[in-house]
Amino acid sequence: MMTMQKKYLLTAVAAVTFLASFGQDKNLRLWYKQPAAQWEETLPLGNGRLGMMPDGGVQNEKIVLNDITLWSGSPQDANNYQAHLRMAEVQKLIAEGKNDVAQDIINQDFICKGAGSGNGNGAGIPFGSFQILANLNLQFSYPGTGDSTPKVEHYQRGLSLEHAVASSSYSINKVNYTKEYFTSFGDDVDVIRITADKPGKLNCKISMDRPERFSTAVNNSMLEISGTLDNGQGGNGMKYFAAVKTKLKGGKLHSLPRELQIKDATEIIIYITAKTDYKDPDFKENALKTLNAAVQKSYAVQKQAHISAYQKLFNRLSINLGTSKSQALPTNERLVNFQNDTHLDPALPALFFQFGRYLLISSIRVGLLPPNLQGLWANQVQTPWNSDYHIDLNLQMNHWPVEVANLSELNLPLTEYVKSLVPNGERTAKAYYNAEGWIAHVAANVWGFTEPGESANWGITKVGPGWLSNNLWMHYQYTGDKKYLLDIYPVIKGAAQFYKSLLTKDAKTGWLVTSPSSSPENAFYLPNGKEASICMGPTIDNQILRELFTNVVFASTELNKDQPFRQELQEILKQIPPVAQVSKKDGRIMEWLEDYKEVEPEHRHISHLYGLYPASLITPESTPDLIEACKKTLNARGDDGTGWSLAYKMLFWARLHDGDRAFKIYKDLMRTTLKTHINYGAGGGVYPNLLVAGPPFQIDGNFGGTAAIAEMLIQSHDGFIDLLPAIPEGWKGIGEIKGIRAQGNYTVNMSWKDGKITSYQIFSPISSYVKVRSNGMIQEVKTTRL
Ligand code: FUC
């Protein structure tokens, strides 16, 4: 054992040089030879609170600004407190197979009061919508070009993932212009520096606007925008404020009534501050304080502080899957090449993976909100699905890469968010189901909306509390942090209490199952030919119950709490359905308790494989009998789908140890599109900026895809660390990853050649032994102390 360890150590050192020579740094860049023609081509910057997307325009540059807290709408009580009175009737109808009749009642009485999420158009109703903060407009004129379009040479635009800095550069009339943009992690402002390499060549007007509800003014050479959003209840909602100050080298600043005008400067630094009154009544003063402090600093110091703060997180992990000729190409061309010569560009998935980590760091700040459907980036006042917190999959997927990608603390805003849902969630549990504990249904927002959605066929899905508890549990699994376990215990216990209250006995099998419920967003045919979604005991509920109750039993033992409740859960665990039922008709995992025929066989949700991922109820080792059924299920659903659905399918195939199939789907995820319509079927892909297109832009596909790449390289959910469990052919040649995480608080470095691990090292806070599968062999391996 000792000799083996030594060998690993030696090769790990050698690997450092190997990494540098592979030029991973050069791979950490997105770049283009032209400005962005539409928002989906712009490059996202963010510091977990502020977002900024510059289009790199030469004459007119539009820079979309965001603040993660900016929501229209307001708190409301949309609970129907009478609903529970019909609970017994609904349960009875479902038990009798009259799901369609039960569904009619649910549509009438078990939905929220009012307009709910407005079918994804909630900007003007209480539910609200995450919104664009403002556009910053820069209008340049270039000396000697008159009114005509200047001849632009050597144009380049890029985003460095190594530094979290975007840039663009070009030459006009032999003057070289350079722009650098970052959302400062150090000073909490947006910073843009524009330079000309010849004196006095910068002329620019700066203005701000947004599609509605704003006013602008210039005060003391500072451009301001402010307004109040619609609270959706006939009154004023959230207030926001943003301001711009400039610092010049050379030239002159003129204040116009609604814009700043700069003439003949050599360098312009633009600072942008923004705040909303979300949990901050002094938002305007605080925004100005931040701005004034930032303006005092030198650009070089500021940029360095930004980079250092960012790199503290980003540099925890490096990945190299090999190099390629395509690597030298602009990102949009590289994406096109990838569809033709996939095996030639293993560096693209590595870039996509690191871009996912970059996006996590950029859209999550400890102490603030978790990333919404678009992270923190939006260019509209009515964003798709209100850019809300969908908790029948999307919010959960947003957090799947966080632990494995060594960004563990970025899970904490989700924990706080889930806690914030509990008070209204308890009211909703009582109102609709006379249940203990808490429930939040499908669409949630920053205002504590936990009520069912506005339609039965999707709105009463029950997976939220249990599925979110899985995310919280993962943070514990990866860190072993007992204080955190104590902190989340009331939340996961409340979730278990809710499901416990909802159980009824299925007369046919004697199993305890949830009722009424549904399998996320899917529908089936009843024997009478009618369509329904409402059912009892959908497979995902059964799997969630099994996982959640087991975890709560574990936690209550570990924390020495609630012994009677623990025993109740243990008793229930003996009476719930098995992990999955396999259809006698077609050998697939059944999505429902009954072997119904689904309305849409290729439906994007694959909820009945929850046990395969993110849960670990189904694994090749522990449930070999279910593996074939999982494969049949996925084959029947088909490989195509919306962006997030592609990512989820990659994850499933990775868990089934089929790296080539996962990679095939990854290739589809990398199809470039510029489409923005709302898609529910096949055809997901990426925009040229590598943000995932459902379409429209939805960040869950980025985060799901990032998690999937990790899952192809390492797994640790089944009692041992599995190295390269699902590596596709094209990545086998030579590769290395350092700083990836495994459950049990381990950090892993590994290198491989021709698909075989050549060296690895496992780090842990205290040296211990851990089971590792490497090159097909499971061994107990001594860890290295961190
Ligand atoms: C659910 C998904 C859709 C989309 C939306 C935000 O409705 O089924 O595909 O992701 O959430």
Image (spheres, rainbow, N blue to C red):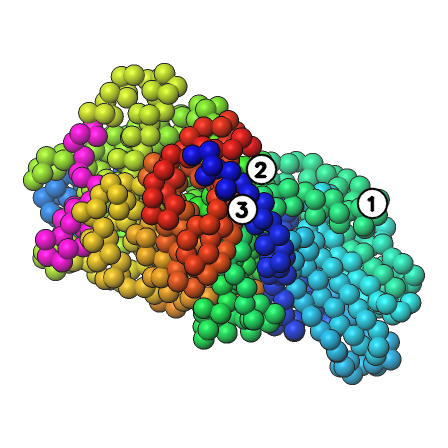
Q: Looking at the image, is mark 1 or mark 3 nearer the viewer?
A: 3
Q: Is residue 340 left or right of residue 159?
A: left
Task: Return the residue at label 1.
Answer: 297
Q: Residue furthest left?
A: 508
Measured in 3D between alpha carbons, the distance from the residue under mark 2 to the one under mark 3, in whole angstroms, is 36 Å
* SS state under label 1: loop
* SS state under label 3: helix
Q: Residue furthest bottom?
A: 148
Q: Is residue 83 above or below residue 222?
A: above
Viewer can see residue 620: yes
The question of residue 573 being in magenta is answered with yes
Q: Is residue 265 above or below residue 111?
A: below
Please tell me which residue lies in front, 740 or 708. 740
Q: Residue at x 18, y 51 (%)?
A: 590
Task: Return the residue at label 2.
Answer: 366
Task: Return the residue at label 3.
Answer: 11
Q: Amino acid at mark 2?
A: Val
* SS state under label 2: loop
Earlier-in-chain disc, 1 versus 3: 3
Q: In the rendered structure, which segment of residues is drawn in magenta?
A: 572-595
Measured in 3D between alpha carbons, the distance from the residue under mark 1 to the one under mark 3, in whole angstroms, is 44 Å
Tag 2 near tag 1, CB within 8 Å = no
Q: Residue at x 60, y 72 (%)?
A: 329
Q: Residue at x 79, y 74 (%)?
A: 171
Q: Tell me the quarter of the picture where residue 80 sits.
A: top left
Tag 1 near tag 3, CB within 8 Å = no
Earlier-in-chain disc, 2 versus 3: 3
Q: Is residue 369 above or below residue 125?
A: above
Measured in 3D between alpha carbons, the distance from the residue under mark 2 to the one under mark 1, in whole angstroms, is 25 Å
Q: Tell me the quarter of the picture where residue 550 sits.
A: top left
Q: Amino acid at mark 3?
A: Thr
Residue count near mark 2 (Cα–Cα under 10 Å), binned few <14, some 14–19, many ≥20: some
